[in-house]
Amino acid sequence: MSSPSPAGRQLQLYISTPQACDYLTDRQSQNIFISPDVTVTPSIYEYLISIGFRRSGQHTYRPHCPSCRACISSRVDVQTFNASKSQRRVLTKNKDLSVSSVQSIFSTEHYELYCRYQAFKHPGGSMESFGENEYEEFLCQSFGNSLMFETRLGEKLLAVSVTDIFGDALSAVYTFFDPEYSARSLGTFSILQQIKATQNRGKRHLYLGYYIKNSVKMAYKTNFMPLEMLIEGKWRRYTKDDELPDQSASLDSPITF
């Protein structure tokens, strides 16, 4: 199985074995992966993310389920984004916080915050049991184009957002925060800060990952309108007045490898 890159290069792909879906009950999921033998540069990955791929550490994947297309790639056009009233309230509520970027490297302070977040947000999940090495592979390893945005109250670390930087976009990889400060809506605040960082860098899009209409975990992305979604291989724009899709492509779509 292979796919052409922008230069016509064939990238070797592998498909995973079926497993229980993390987002939709009673469904099986599969992913296709770029071969680990392929050197994925930031420019190659920027192309891959534009056609629906994501990464976990240095593993690049895309959902490829035989009977389901519920995972839809999504991104925000930051040049047309306007914060909603509730989002402006989140910004006002958190005016006492500072945000800065640091290198994407292992930090004990980050790891301890990650562990508290997983125990609160995803108890019993596979990522709750990550040791330091697994955490580092998941969030500190990239294709050489990542930053970590730290949110602090004074000296206290409240949230970390792992973010990839591309030529014309940023990509939100993963955010974790202190559960004791959940009332501050730190998840929403972190996305708003990544949108701001994208705007400040003069770039066009912030990639948010997969939207799944029937998954509470993934549906929050529609709070950041207008939202662009990858449907039938083309990016389409949706506003709050539009009926949102629940499928990304038919089984025989050209986007399927």
Image (cartoon, rainbow, N blue to C red):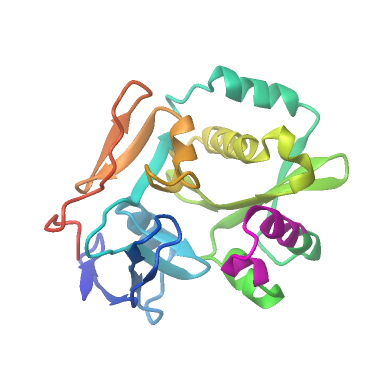
Q: Nearer the viewer, residue 102 or 24?
A: 24
Side (left or right) of 49 relative to 8: right
**For the point 38% across and 23% down, which residue is it?**
240
**Furthest residue to the front?**
26
Residue 119 falls inside the magenta stretch? yes
Above or below, 98 relative to 95: below
Q: Which residues are magenta?
A: 113-129
From the top left corner, tell me how far across and down residue 197 is, in percent: 58, 38
From the top left corner, tell me how far across and down residue 39 is, in percent: 41, 75
Residue 161 appears in the picture as rendered: no
**For the point 53% across and 32% down, which residue is it?**
199
In the figure, residue 140 lies in which quadrant?
bottom right
Q: Nearer the viewer, residue 26 or 142?
A: 26
Side (left or right) of 180 relative to 141: right
From the top left corner, tell me how far across and down residue 181 is, in percent: 77, 40
**For the point 19% across and 66% down, which residue is it?**
257
**For the point 41% across and 69% down, which residue is it?**
40
In the figure, residue 35 lies in which quadrant?
bottom left
Side (left or right) of 131 relative to 53: right
- If the image is split into quadrants, where does the N terminus sit? bottom left
Above or below, 98 relative to 106: above
